[in-house]
Image (cartoon, rainbow, N blue to C red):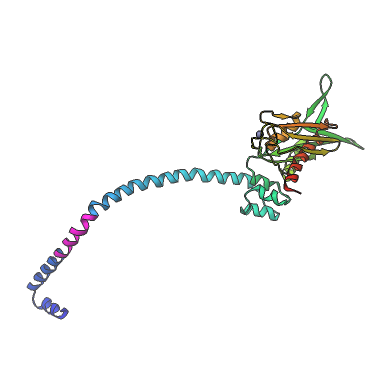
């Protein structure tokens, strides 16, 4: 066929027209069928669908973008604030940095010692801190005016050398609390040290409703009676029903509030004027709560 076509093309020009017309006709015959069969479907249904889809798809994309953009920066900012300038040195710190540990309870349940305060910062976002009024000086009209910093002096050849001591409590108001003492030449340094050390000293407080008058099962109090001791101070904490509040002195209130306990009764023995020992006794009482429950 190819040879014949070539010969015809070379020899006769008239036949080209005929061939062209034939081809056109063939094309017309072939195409219209397709056009008639397929385009009807394509034109009638697909176009409407495509238009609808386009109309639907575009807003979705825009909405998703709008939602996603504000979320990401917040997380990034939170992480950055906590971890800026932090180079983890311990194995635990590196694991936290890599995101392998996301819950502080994983660390506390295993009893691993925390050696970097940034670990606690990274894992607990809403950590609060409070200072215990351990210091005091003679107030106006007698008595003692309480201050958050205790200033002590040691004698030296050249006179008195002062140092400041602070006692800090940290907690998230949801079962995690820590206390520590810090000292330095300046009170600012003492406070910073105390807070950092308190973060390393955090414990998990088991809460519950151990009151036979309440029996609601919510963690607003402690599960059972507990005791703690520091120096001459002995503290007994007892579960109380809802609405009783914290029946303790103002300093002990701070640690119980930061631990997330709302109702409690207490009894103290010894020199409770030494606030340092008083708070430590409460802390040990809360610590014992956990020790008994885990059967240690
Ligand atoms: Zn209750």
* Outermost residue, front side: 212
Left-right relation of 74 to 14? right
In percent of width and height, residue 285 lies at: 77, 39
Compare residues 211 and 17 and report the one nearer the observer.
211
Q: Visible in this render: residue 247? A: yes
Residue at horizontal 11 percent and vertical 77 percent from the top = 8
**In the rendered structure, does residue 275 fall within the stretch colored magenta?**
no
Query: In this picture, which residue range is highlighted in magenta?
Result: 29-41
* Above-or-below relation of 28 to 106: below
Above or below, 142 against 63 in this view is above
> Quarter-wise, where is residue 189 in the image?
top right
| Residue drawn 64% across the image and 44% down it | 124
Toward the right, the furthest residue is 157
| Residue 210 place in picture, x, y as percent | 70, 36
Residue 156 lies, in percent from the top left, at 91, 38
**Residue plotted at (65% across, 39% down):** 174
Residue 243 left/right relative to 49: right
The answer to whether 177 appears left or right of 157 in the picture is left
Quadrant the N terminus occupies = bottom left
Taking depth in this image into account, of 26 and 9 the one nearest to the observer is 26
From this view, report whether residue 121 is shown above or below residue 271: below
Q: Image height check: is 52 above or below 154?
A: below
Residue placed farthest to the left in the image? 14
Q: Quadrant of ligand 1?
A: top right
> Is residue 38 one of those drawn in magenta?
yes
């Amino acid at each position: 066929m190819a040879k014949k076509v070539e010969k015809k093309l070379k020899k006769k020009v008239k036949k080209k027209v005929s061939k062209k017309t034939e081809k056109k006709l063939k094309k017309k015959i072939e195409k219209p069928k397709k056009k008639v069969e397929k385009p009807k479907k394509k034109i009638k249904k697909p176009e409407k669908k495509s238009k609808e889809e386009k109309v639907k798809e575009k807003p979705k994309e825009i909405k998703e973008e709008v939602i996603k953009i504000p979320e990401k920066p917040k997380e990034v900012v939170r992480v950055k604030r906590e971890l800026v300038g932090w180079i983890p040195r311990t194995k635990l710190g590196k694991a936290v940095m890599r995101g392998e540990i996301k819950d502080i309870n994983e660390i506390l349940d295993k009893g691993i010692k925390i050696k970097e305060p940034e670990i606690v910062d990274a894992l607990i976002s809403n950590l609060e801190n409070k200072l215990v009024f351990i210091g005091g000086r003679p107030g106006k009209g007698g008595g003692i005016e309480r201050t958050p910093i205790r200033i002590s002096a040691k004698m030296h050849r050249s006179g008195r050398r002062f140092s400041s001591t602070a006692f800090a409590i940290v907690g998230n108001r949801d079962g995690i609390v820590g206390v520590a003492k810090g000292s330095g030449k300046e009170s600012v340094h003492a406070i910073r040290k105390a807070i950092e050390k308190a973060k390393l000293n955090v414990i998990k407080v088991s809460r519950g409703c151990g009151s036979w008058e309440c029996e609601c099962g919510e963690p607003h109090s402690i599960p059972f009676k507990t005791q703690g001791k520091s120096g001459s101070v002995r503290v007994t904490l007892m579960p109380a029903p809802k609405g009783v509040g914290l029946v303790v002195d103002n300093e002990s209130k701070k640690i119980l509030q930061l631990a997330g306990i709302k109702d409690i009764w207490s009894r103290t023995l010894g020199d409770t004027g030494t606030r340092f020992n008083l708070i430590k006794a409460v802390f040990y009482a809360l610590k014992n709560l956990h020790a008994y429950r885990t059967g240690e």
